[in-house]
Image (spheres, grey):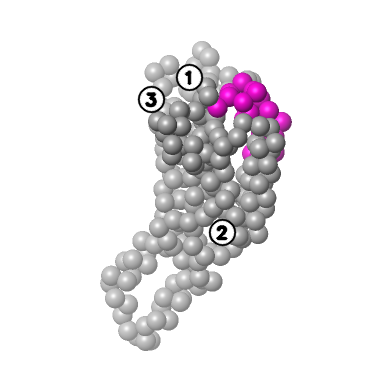
Amino acid sequence: HISHRAQCASRWPPGAAMPAAFSLRRRLSAPFAVTPRCAILFRRWVALLVLLEAASRWDALRWLYTDSGALPRRLVLPDPAEDPLAWAVCAHAWHGSLAWAQALTALQASAAVGLFFGARGAGVLAWWLHLSACLRVPPLIFILDRYLHLLLAFAVLLPTPPPSGGSSLASLLLAVQLVAIYQDAGGAKLRDPAAAWSLDAPVAALDTYLRHTP
């Protein structure tokens, strides 16, 4: 933030007072400023998450994303006549074969590689295909899928900051999202009627989670 402050100060002649409104705006936006290096690293880590998610889904494509598996389209998706928008957005619903599911997953992995190297259009494609995969198997979607959806949205919408760093609506919302995640998780644990997250709980939730989560 030092270079950001220096750049702002250079706009005013030596000895001249910085306008109060501009100074207040700069102070409020400074905590949410993002440097180009941070933006690049953020997009690359999100791209790696998409690649890992696609790789982990590959072996389950036949059983979860085809009509011959446990979740055929006719059972988990609404009728096309009742909800044509869902069928238009969900590319995974356009065909029920294994080859189609594999092709979409490979395309999503390729888009993640493009996002890793800074292609914003590839990020939009990876974002849409993640949404499509979630719409195809709604019974299996949980909170981490929603988090990845939001991270992809921020990776696409986050503008390229100036060399000295800068804030934007996307960087502000990303910070709010990170705070909201921990506030929601911490509040739910504190308000748990069974107090399963306390140290003296008869059946500790954390111990159960660590023992039975792969």
**How many numbered discs, if any?**
3
| SS state under label 3 | loop
Q: Nearer the viewer, mark 1 or mark 2?
A: 2
| SS state under label 1 | loop
Q: Residues within 10 Å of mark 2 (few under 14, many from 20)?
A: some
Q: In this view of the protein, can residue 86 be seen by the observer?
A: yes
Q: Amino acid at mark 2?
A: Arg
In the picture, the disc for residue 191 is 3
Res. 121 image quadrant: bottom right
Labels 3 and 2 touching (C-beta < 8 A): no
Q: Amino acid at mark 3?
A: Arg
Q: Amino acid at mark 1?
A: Ala
> What's drawn in magenta, residue-wise?
52-73
Where residue 137 appears, as percent x and y from the top left, is: 54, 29
Per the image, the residue denoted by label 1 is 196
- Distance of label 3 from label 2 (alpha carbons): 41 Å
Q: Residues within 10 Å of mark 1 (few under 14, many from 20)?
A: some
Closer to the camera, 43 or 192? 43
Q: What residue sits 49% from the left and 16% below the top?
A: 201
Left or right of residue 111: residue 141: left
Where residue 50 appears, as percent x and y from the top left, is: 62, 44
Per the image, the residue denoted by label 2 is 120
- Distance of label 1 from label 2 (alpha carbons): 43 Å
Q: Nearer the viewer, mark 3 or mark 2?
A: 2
Quadrant housing the C terminus:
top right
Can residue 111 be found in the magenta stretch?
Answer: no
Closer to the camera, 119 or 8? 119
Of the image marks 1 and 2, the number of the one nearer the N terminus = 2
Q: What residue sits 46% from the left and 66% below the top?
A: 166
